[in-house]
Image (cartoon, coloured by chain):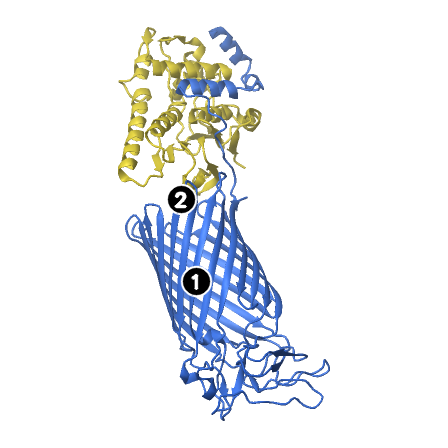
Amino acid sequence: MGGPCEVLAEVADETEARKITDAVAACAWRVENKFSRYRADNIVARINAAAGSSVEVDSETADLLDFAALVHRLSDGLFDITSGVLRKAWTFDGGRRLPAQSEIDALLPFVGWSKVHWLRPMITLPPGMQIDFGGIGKEYAVDQAIQLVAQMSSAALLVNFGGDLAVTRSRDGNRAWRVGIEGIDAAVQRAAMLVDLTAGALSTSGDTYRYVESEGRRLSHILDPRTGWPVSGAPRSVTVAAPTCTNAGMLTTLAMLRGPKAEAFLESEGVRHWVQRST
Amino acid sequence: MAGAASAAAAAGVTDMADKDVKIGAALAAATCSLLGTAAPGVSVAADAEPQWDIESAFLYYGESDDRVKDLSLSAHATRDFGDERTLGLDLSVDSLTGASPSGAIATDGVQTFTSPSGRKTYSTPAGEIPLDESFLDTRFALNGSWSQPLARLYRVSAGLGFSSEYDYQHIGANFGLTRDFNQRNTTLSAALAYGQDTVKPVGGLPLPLTQMGDAVDDAMSPANRGDSNDTKDVLDVLLGVTQVLGRHTVLRVNLSYSDSSGYLTDPYKLLSVVDPVTGDLIGRTPATGASGPTGVYLYESRPDSRRKEGLYAEMRHDFSGKVLQVGYRYSTDDWEVDSHTLESRLRLPFGSSSYLEPHVRYYQQTAASFYRYSLANVTPLPDFASADARLSEMDALTFGLKYGHVTAGGNEWNARLEFYRQTAKAPNDVLIGNQIGNTQMPDFDAVILQFGYHFKL
């Protein structure tokens, strides 16, 4: 999941606690194994390796593809699960190497959900194109896990996969879960803001660790699928609270993609949000 | 479709992102469809920025027989700035009324005293314990502290405090350091506090072990008064260890040392001077045309230093939600006041958001070496003498019950009712003649009623 996964549970019984953590871990591994682009044996690998031929997908994958297609449409193409190909030109490891425009131009023909033929349950990618659920997977896994454990236990639970998290309910005694949002300056390990969560989910998108520097400018890892370049003027970190983690995650990603207008976007959507920018 | 997207990309990307069309509802619906859940209602209650966490309380304390009453409003506010950096502020206002025993003994006749100001007299009926003149005072106190981690396992705190009432001022500073060991199962702590108090009694500081004189008018200074004020310095040192003993038990042990120096006498306390054989009050006649005491009363005198050492041990155990806390304190000092305190609380949760907490406390102390019930009319006088019941042999018992309820918003309100009974003892060796079997110690009962509200701002 690209980060620490944790479960906070208010249960007195050790057996129950173990049952819950085991279920969450199993759920995390299931989603990871099924949708990670780093594996050669899953549905994503099969779709990406089909080289122009059609692949029939299971209903869960189909649901995710439907969702990705809808968000692509809602965001006028800003959110695009085919943009991963651009990573061949970009390495966001804090370094300074910028790709040449020619490298990006060579990749752009292989980016664009509009070029994909998707008719449930069949998907066909033009040769050279790839899909990747990196922008949805973690939040989706949190929601899957929280639904699963909410059915197993009435206890107050918080599931956190690398900063994307959801809770089943308020803590015992009607207390809130107090969540610290990491500050943008990684050197100072402190929670910049505190959020009291009694229900719902939080998702954070940021460039604390993933960025590239150019002429003193820090370019975010958020790539605009239509230009192939990082979105300019993007905040350093965006956190959104929403009923589900997937919902929150989409809003943070879309806010990031709006660059300087991230705050305006979140304001107009009327969601609770916390934006951190470099001063 | 593909052509349209390319054309749009060529036309420039920012325009597309600028469309001010709300997508929230469609996105939420799509998410619910993806996750196979019904659309949740408003389920997010999140608040940004550090918050003030405030424990406020209104307290009534009332002693029996119309003695001291205290109405108090207090607020303890903490603000978490993240990363365990916290600011704490304490504010309290007390309104004290009533009177407390002056130290003079009850007698068969009416007793007359000169008030602390030295300008007026007041009388105590026969057979009653003399109380010092009724007072009305407002006390204001403010404390601020800052606490933060220093390194990975260290934590420091520093604070300043101030309090004021019409005849008493206090300023103080404190510093604390804790260190975690043993995977944070053990915490060692050290704390240092220094305070300076200024006593400025009405009418000036009485000279120790001198006689209360007649009331005088404003043109003259009252008899046997010294400076208008004096100070007291108090240094406190505390060393503690907190040890986690398993998943449900925590033990805390503290060692404390306290060194007070300066003016430690109570300027309003008296001693009755009595016949060394009968134990009866020595009579006195005010000067002609003056009003004043009808007996011989001396102002008390205490040493100018006091060193206390204490040991405190507390155990907390969680019996699956029911938390039992038992504490014991031993304290000894060079005034020979040795005390034992045993205290216990049990928190019993019930329902989903309420609790009951019974509380019991027993306290017992020995008398100070210079405690006297009264002072025999012999020479020479002792260097130090006090008839303050708080320095006598005594015990005290407290019973209480607290009820707390956590609201849907996560705030808590609570109510606490406690009964306190203090019983002082005067063994025969501090009594003289007729006093034996005839002693009236200034015992009293008190009621404590408190309403608290714990909320966030």
Of residues A26 and B411, which is closer to you in this image?
Answer: B411
How would you rate the neighbour count of disc 2 (Cα within 10 Å): few for under 14, some for 14-19, many for 20 or more? Answer: few
Q: Specify whether disc 1 shares its chain with disc 2.
A: yes
Q: Secondary structure at mark 2?
A: strand
Of residues B255 and A260, which is closer to you in this image?
Answer: B255
Q: Secondary structure at mark 1?
A: strand
Residue B350: image tag: 2
Q: Which chain is yellow?
A: A
Compared with B137, A134 (above or below) is above
Compared with B166, A124 (above or below) is above
Q: Which chain is blue?
A: B
The chain containing the residue under callout 2 comes to B
Of residues B369 and B48, which is closer to you in this image?
Answer: B369
Q: Residue at x 50, y 35 (%)?
A: B46
Image quadrant in which the N terminus of chain A is located:
top left
The chain containing the residue under callout 1 comes to B
The quarter of the picture where residue B16 lies is top right
Q: Residue at x 45, y 52 (%)?
A: B402
Q: Is residue A257 visible?
A: yes
The quarter of the picture where residue B392 lies is bottom left
How would you rate the neighbour count of disc 1 (Cα within 10 Å): few for under 14, some for 14-19, many for 20 or more? Answer: some
Amino acid carrying label 2: it is Phe
Compared with B304, A141 (above or below) is above
Compared with A163, A113 (above or below) is above
Residue B398: image tag: 1
The quarter of the picture where residue B289 lies is bottom right
Of residues B91 and A227, which is closer to you in this image?
Answer: B91
Q: Is residue B52 visible?
A: no
Give the image location of residue A156, x and y in percent. Answer: 38, 36
